[in-house]
Image (cartoon, grey):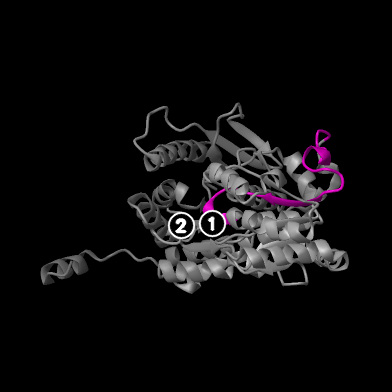
Amino acid sequence: MLSWEYPPKSVGGLAPHVHGLAGALATRGHEVHIVTQGGDGLPEQDDDRGVLVHRIHPYALWALDFAGGIHHLNFAFLEKAAALAATYGEFDVIHAHDWLSAFAGRALKHAWQKPLIATIHATEWGRHNGLHNDLQRYISQVEWWLCYESWRVIVCSRHMQRELSWIFQLPVDKMAVIPNGVHPEEFAANQVTNDFNRSDYAADQERLIVYVGRLVWEKGVQILIEAVPEVLDRFPDAKLVITGTGSQLSYLRHLARARGVGHKVLFTGYVATGIKVGLLRAADVAVFPSLYEPFGIVALEAMAAGTPVVVGETGGLAEIIDHRRNGLKTYPGNASSLAAQIKTVLGDPGLAQAMVKEAGREISRVYSWQAIAEQTLGVYQAVCGNLGQSRRQERPFPLAQFFRVAKSGVR
């Protein structure tokens, strides 16, 4: 597997996805190698639950732009993969995660003559609601190219299947819909670190509303802040804690002050995993008001932590949550709708508890990494079977036929 990030290096949902999938495959007896970024004092090679993690350093060269830096990263990926093949022997499948590893994935496919699988976790078009500059158009082009070069493309939701079919005209039968997952045990009470204290984030009498994620436009955090005044009208003891970093941080701080709720909104910045688990478990409600969300692993994390969730009815979140059964859904981009659903959770403890119980059952039944690994393994086995069949059917091209084709002018 080729992945831009892998724990403990984690920016978004890609790292926990690769971590969960690789670990589940390894426990089933498969040999899994991850090539990813290093740095921050991390070991160059690590054994993570049976997964062999190989961390590389991109070239110590100044890149002209972000895309150039990704090219440097992919060259380093290639060098490491070549060394791994010399040490461990042939690999059966190459699995590239998102466009960030597309160049190395495609090159290895052709060099090794092995099938390339791609997981598209999100699209540039979806993240920005269109393509508005040359960099976005370039990234979208690479995403299309990765889909074209891959034998199969894995997406995490039916929403993403429709998106790729529409944006890239990708055939539906080339895609496999396999959801993301979560390890419930990682969100149990014993995973909360000793340095977590609820009182550091809210007073004892305050109702705790928690958001965890990147602070970017498509996550809809601005809508959540706009909803706070309506929530406070009914529940003046409510407190919103926003955990994460991103390009909108300064704007969101300003927005909270402008709406007169700055004293009721706490921005924590990045927090360690044990603190995040503590916040999710301590919350009265976890809110993810995304405007665009291919899947939404963090909603599964809150469900695993035993916290009622409110989500924007968009993308994969709309498929995870069944309204009033395992959570509540709100109209995307509508602050009044969001405030109403938050108030429903805070005002109806019976409903909140019933949703938490159903969410817990669903986490175990549908979103376990073992079930997801089994589906992914089915994709691997299918492409490897097709590869063997195509090789058995290959025939040498007759030289006489070549001359007839060349003479006829056909190219």
Going from N to C along the chain, the mark reached first, 1 or 2, is 2
Residue for badge 2? 128
Q: CA distance from mark 1 to mark 2?
A: 7 Å
Q: Residue at x 12, y 69 (%)?
A: 409
Indicate yes or no whether the magenta region holds residue 346. Answer: no
Q: Does 105 appear above or below 377?
A: above
Q: Residue at x 62, y 45 (%)?
A: 257
Q: Judge whether residue 254 can be spotted in this image.
A: yes
Determine crowd level at label 2: few under 14, some 14-19, many 20+ residues with C-alpha closer than 10 A: few
Give the position of the C terminus as an image quadrant: bottom left
Task: Give amino acid for label 1.
Answer: Glu
In screen coordinates, is 353 left or right of 387?
right
In screen coordinates, is 84 left or right of 239?
left
Q: Please tell me whether mark 2 sits on a helix, a strand or a loop.
A: helix
- Say if mark 1 contacts mark 2, CB within 8 Å: yes
Q: Residue at x 42, y 67 (%)?
A: 167
In percent of width and height, residue 162 lies at 50, 71
